[in-house]
Image (spheres, coloured by chain):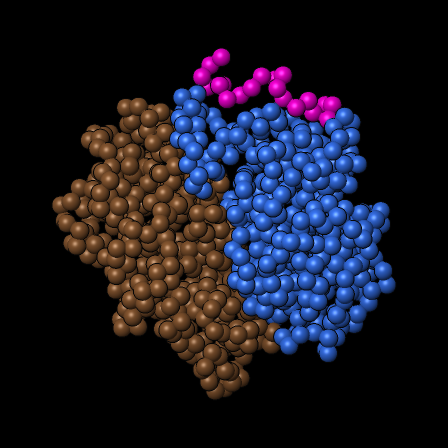
Chain colours: A blue, B brown
Amino acid sequence: MSRRTALKVGAAGLIPWLLSGSALSQVKLGNRGHNLVVIFLRGGSDGLNMMVPYADDNYYKARPSVGIAANKVEKLNDYFGLHPSLKPFKSWYEKGELCLTPAVGSQDRTRSHFEAMLAMERGTATGHSGTANGWLARYLTMTQSEQDGPLRSVAWADTMPDSLQGAPAPLVVQSVTDFRLDADAEFVRNLGTMYKNGDDSLVHRAGELTLDALKKIEQLDPKNYKPSGGAVYADDYLGKGLKEVSALIKSKLGLEIACLETTGWDTHFAQGADTGIHANNLASVANNVNAFLNDLGESRKETTVVIMTEFGRRIGENASLGTDHGRASVMMVFNGVNGGKIDGAWPGIGKDQVDEVGDLKPVNDYREILTKHLSPKMPEIAKVWG
Amino acid sequence: MISRRDALLVAGGAAIAGCGRLATEARRRKPAPEYRAKPKDRSARMIDRMSFGWSVEEADRFASLGEAEYVERQLKADFDEPLELTIQLQSLDCLRMNGFELIEIPRGRVTQQLQSAAILRATYSPNQLRERLVDFWSNHFNIYAGKADGAFFKSNEEEQIIRKHALGKFRDMAIAMSKSPAMLVYLDNNQNFKGHPNENYARELMELHTLGIDGGYTQKDIQELARCLTGWTMEDRSIWASHALRARGSFYFDKSKHDDGAKHVFGLDLPAGGGIRDGELVVEHLVSHEEAGKYLAKKLVKFFTGAQNLELEKTVLDQFQKTGGDIPSMVRPIMTAPALIEGPPIMRRPFELMCAALRVSGAATDGGPALQNHLKKMGQPIYEWPLPDGYPVDQLSWATNLLPRWQFVYDMANGKIPNTFVKAPDAVALASQLAHPDFQYA
């Protein structure tokens, strides 16, 4: 065996993907038999164009160019309809696996991306009103156990999302497929000596975690992973990421919480309506999440998928065919509770119903919605909010 | 068919690019610097905190000038640039051409060249403090080169606004920035018209560029400021007007799109009919406001010392107020404070880690795509952070993504990165040193 291949393991050690579709889908997943996937839409996705109040004249008056025509929406009831790009979600809604909540937000009133994201990722009322670590980090700390492996919480990102900051062992990867070290054995041994020396600093712990995760992931063979259920992922960040999440879940390597994030939602200019920038972004989410659910097959019922964003956008469009920062948007949860329902309160978008700036009121606090959906499988979640 | 002009451009470009390669080669052929371990002393700590990382050359410069003079020279940034660096930079189109000319070059190549320029300067310029501040301000006024024409205009912005004023006056930089095409495009102010203003730039101008989130402004102030800035836009194509070229991307004030009613913004009353002066008056008000001074003081102190330090922030704020936002006067107290070297370790961001590794190992590099690929994998492809707040500075954001750092230092030490050359007597020893937890920190 050459020094160069010292880190690679033989074919016998790899997860047999060809068997995985039938055999592995029967077994319980993750450490606690449940997985959570959080997809954060950074920039503030326009909830009013995700769940369109198509029966409300106020909507069309406020949005002469970015409004979605009533005959284009995927009707959910006699008031709300989904954006046409979200069509793949309609069948999950009808099957009772998707719950939609409109008018979700935090107490943040600054309408700053960064404050609103901090609030939602720290699990606090506003960006600087509580503790500095993340809501998922607190959950992971509360439920820590000896069995936790290095892949319990993984973010597909360039930098650690705030929701995981302070977690016991949060791993950040751009790609699991590329998560390997092409180096000779002496260098790898040195890394072990330098990072696994008992020092408890952040970077030492991160190094130790990385070395342990390398050992786990080398069993995965993600390049040869074949999705099941006819699932077709797009060749974009979200498609590649969700495919890897699925591979990790099926491989039972200990993944419990996966965080993904996409940008491009800050549509001040040329947002588009049933086509255009926002429509394309939504299509990527819908098609890739749809593929992910199909790929997981029956085991998707043990996987809760949350799609959230820091705020929604102003009801009235601006003069550059876009929308400015608002306060409330939509939260979509797959395989939580109340599947097949439109949940929470709806404050309305009439003149007397909006807030002082003209925004949809965030009458459904994001923490209450998350608790409702997650606590049946993750009872400690009720205690994480600051 | 290729025109005569194009043919000349191609030939000229190739000749110039060839010079850049020769400069890299010349640097490669220089004898390796004498190997010397970094001492654990005050001078090495200061260099690590002020610069993109300790090197033998930097240590010699520090030693020959002495601490006080070294700091003053860095604040003046008057060291001669090395010839190889100058030639390498001159070979880059993005530094020779204007934004509207760069549009003819593929966008990806422009971004690549921008990154090359930044890596080369941060690695080789003796004016290290200036380069750190360029990085600081470039993130402070972050734009995403991937949005619309951003990449083409970023180069001029970086040269003529950020680099020009990095050690000048904050107000000059921020005022110029308010009319910079890269920023107009990135935060949509080129699409801000009367009637229903686009609030994007107005918000970030207060929140990120001047006052900070705690600066005391309200949503109403943002909306009023957006009204002031209606009609601040740019040419979307090049035209001849009054015997002069008005190039694509030139700022202009479109009176017909400006909301000329009376406004009240953050304590300023602006009567109706102010035209372009509405926006200019507010920008001038914001850039010299005490809240801006507080916000900048906090950010600068954190950037260089790794921690909050109320006393030092107060000193920096005093300088901001006394000198009208003179950046060297604000930075000097930080460079001479005990907190500079006594503050907590600062986790190097990937760009800083990369330059520190190149510097300490005396590498010859073109700063090109092969190196940039590592920067991307480490998570910091500069000029490509999509949100307007710039790359994070805290260690929690970066500490858990170590694997691509290890691959980078290993590849660099082993000569596996094309156009990056290191003369290491023992590659594994060098790679291990650079992968060491300590080296991740300044």
Q: Quick check: A342 above or below B433?
A: below
Q: Quick check: B224 above or below B96?
A: below
Along the horizontal axis of the image, is B109 left or right of A115? left
The extreme top residue here reads A1
Is residue A63 a member of the stretch shown in magenta?
no
Task: Work out whether residue B318 or residue B91 is closer to the camera in this orientation and state it.
Answer: B318
Task: Work out whether residue B361 or residue B438 is closer to the camera in this orientation and state it.
Answer: B438
Q: Residue at x 47, y 37 (%)?
A: A205
Q: Residue at x 63, y 31 (%)?
A: A253
Q: Quick check: B245 above or below A180?
A: below
- Residue B352 locus on image (x, y percent): 37, 44
Along the horizontal axis of the image, is A136 left or right of A279? left
Q: Residue at x 29, y 45 (%)?
A: B48
- Residue B254 visible, this orientation: no
The extreme bottom residue here reads B271
- Residue A311 locus on image (x, y percent): 63, 61
- Residue B83 locus on image (x, y percent): 22, 43
Residues in magenta, as a range: A1-20
Task: Work out whether residue A280 or residue A46 is closer to the camera in this orientation and state it.
Answer: A46
Give the position of the C terminus of chain B as an image quadrant: top left
Q: Quick check: B153 above or below B207?
A: above
